Image (cartoon, rainbow, N blue to C red):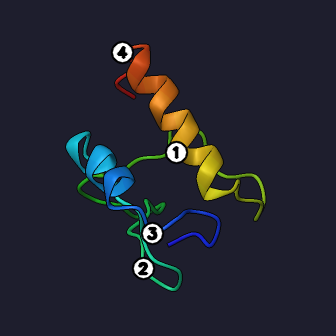
């Protein structure tokens, strides 16, 4: 889990209800690759560098998208 997110079950439950998972630090995330044959996962915009926003910023963005009815 990102270090800046509290261990708050209410936040995890909120995100779970909208199919958002928080992966713990060191956890593995399945990402798309150039050889994804089944195209199950795909980048909307590929990453440009190694920067990653804080967990709190991600949760706020998810909440904003859900509040606007954004599905992607």
Position of residue 53 measured from the top left corner of the image (x, y, whole percent): 70, 53
Q: Which of marks 1 and 4 is nearer the N terminus?
A: 1
Q: In this view, does 15 lie above or below 7?
A: above
Q: Distance between the residues labelled 4 and 3?
A: 27 Å
The crowding category of the residue bearing disc 2, from other C-alpha atoms within 10 Å (few below 14, some 14 to 19, many at least 20), is few
Q: How many labels does the image show?
A: 4
**Circle 1 sits on which residue?**
59
Q: Distance between the residues labelled 3 and 2?
A: 19 Å
Q: Which of marks 1 and 4 is in front?
A: 1
Q: Distance between the residues labelled 2 and 1?
A: 19 Å
Q: Nearer the viewer, mark 3 or mark 2?
A: 3
Q: How far apart are marks 2 and 4 (CA)?
A: 29 Å
The crowding category of the residue bearing disc 3, from other C-alpha atoms within 10 Å (few below 14, some 14 to 19, many at least 20), is few
Q: Which of marks 2 and 1 is in front?
A: 1
Q: Distance between the residues labelled 1 and 3?
A: 13 Å
Dots 1 and 3: beta carbons under 8 Å? Answer: no
Q: Looking at the figure, which quarter contains the C terminus?
A: top left
Q: Which mark is residue 7?
A: 3
| Of residues 7 and 50, the one drawn nearer to the viewer in this rendering | 7
Q: Nearer the viewer, mark 1 or mark 3?
A: 3
The crowding category of the residue bearing disc 1, from other C-alpha atoms within 10 Å (few below 14, some 14 to 19, many at least 20), is some
| Of residues 25 and 9, the one drawn nearer to the viewer in this rendering | 9
Q: Distance between the residues labelled 1 and 4?
A: 15 Å
């Amino acid at each position: 889990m990102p270090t800046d997110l509290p261990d708050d079950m209410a936040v995890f439950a909120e995100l779970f209800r909208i199919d958002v998972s928080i992966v713990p630090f060191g956890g593995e995330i399945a990402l798309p690759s150039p050889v994804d044959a089944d195209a199950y996962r795909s980048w909307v915009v590929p990453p440009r560098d190694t920067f990653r926003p804080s967990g709190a910023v991600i949760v706020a963005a998810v909440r904003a998208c859900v509040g606007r009815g954004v599905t992607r």
